[in-house]
Image: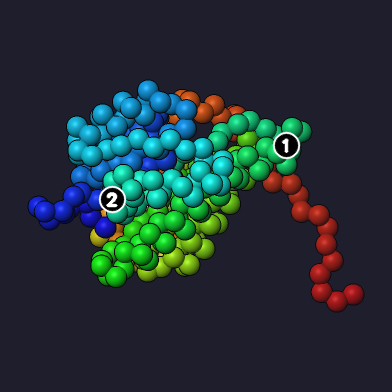
Amino acid sequence: MSATASPSALPPVVLVTGAAKRLGRAIALKLAANGWRVAVHYRDSVEEARQTVADCGRLTPGAQAFRSNLGMETAVRNLLPAVVEAMGPVDAVVNCASTFEHDNAATFSFAAMEKHMRSNAGAAILLAQGLHAHLSARQALEPKARGVVVNLLDQKLWNQTPDFVSYTLSKAALDAANSMLALALQPLVRVVGVAPVMGQHQPLLRGEKLAERSASLPSHHQETDLDTTAAVLLALQESSISGTTLLVEEELPQDKPQAPVPAPQPPAAPAGRRHGRR
């Protein structure tokens, strides 16, 4: 999908969740700079959302803010229709918002897991479902209309630590959902994951080569040296990418403290086993 439009048409619309601050804001600005009208979702960061809307609007006019609690199913189901009513047809959703609260094996609870699963996995799935329904309704007048869902994952899936258990489980669930949604929602909606990794993976594809080789992506996960915002833009633009996750090498975000990674331990001697016939 490209953000180019005919002179008589409005630029395409993308809903970016959690777009008021930090990575969500950076993604919103990147997309606005490349011709997208951005629907800026936020929950409590009113002033930051207004600033993001103003900044996006200077790049591509028409950005608007939308408040929603992604932990509430009714609120999530109402979010995309509200964007459609205010901004017209929606072409993409970038799920960046997430609950990020500390727990570990000792403090884990059903309540903590449910809270993270609702906002981090459930909301993204419902928004993908909503975009598919929206595009299905557009088919009579726009038979070629297609959409994209980009789900932001986390380096913890590739760099396991014993803390933030509920958060990590919710991102693992979203990672699994990417593959299922890509199969279920095709051909109207592509689904792509984007995840920062912290230098422990050697990129398989260089950024400038990824677009031309994306049609032959051989596995569920591929790596790229693009930054996260550029990877999101690529996922929106490159129609051959779906059902895969782009791994992006980046520095640790300063707003999300990470536990130290334990030093690697030498492999234990294998336990004795009997082989062959007695």
Q: Quadrant of residue 79?
A: top left
Which residue bears the numbered disc 1?
A: 108
Q: Residue at point 40% right, 50% down?
A: 81
Q: Is residue 75 or residue 216 the one in the foreground?
A: 75
Can you say whether 226 is above or below 263 in the image?
A: below
Q: Position of residue 194 (x, y in %)?
A: 42, 48
Label 2, secondary structure: give it: loop
User: Looking at the picture, which amino acid does disc 1 mark?
Assistant: Phe
Q: Residue furthest right?
A: 278
Q: Residue at point 56% right, 29% down?
A: 258
Q: Residue at point 48% right, 61% down?
A: 181
Q: Is residue 230 left or right of residue 45?
A: left
Label 1, secondary structure: give it: loop
Color encoding of the figure = rainbow
Which residue bears the numbered disc 2?
A: 88
Q: Is residue 104 or residue 186 the one in the foreground?
A: 186
Q: Residue at point 20% right, 45% down?
A: 35
Can you say whether 182 is above or below 120 in the image?
A: below
Q: Residue furthest top?
A: 47
User: Looking at the picture, which amino acid does disc 2 mark?
Assistant: Gly
Q: Position of residue 249 (x, y in %)?
A: 40, 41
Numbered label attached to residue 205: none
> Tag 2: Cα neighbours inside 10 Å, few (<14), some, or many (≥20)?
few
Q: Nearer the viewer, mark 2 or mark 1?
A: 2
Q: Is residue 10 or residue 194 the one in the foreground?
A: 10
Q: Residue furthest front?
A: 85
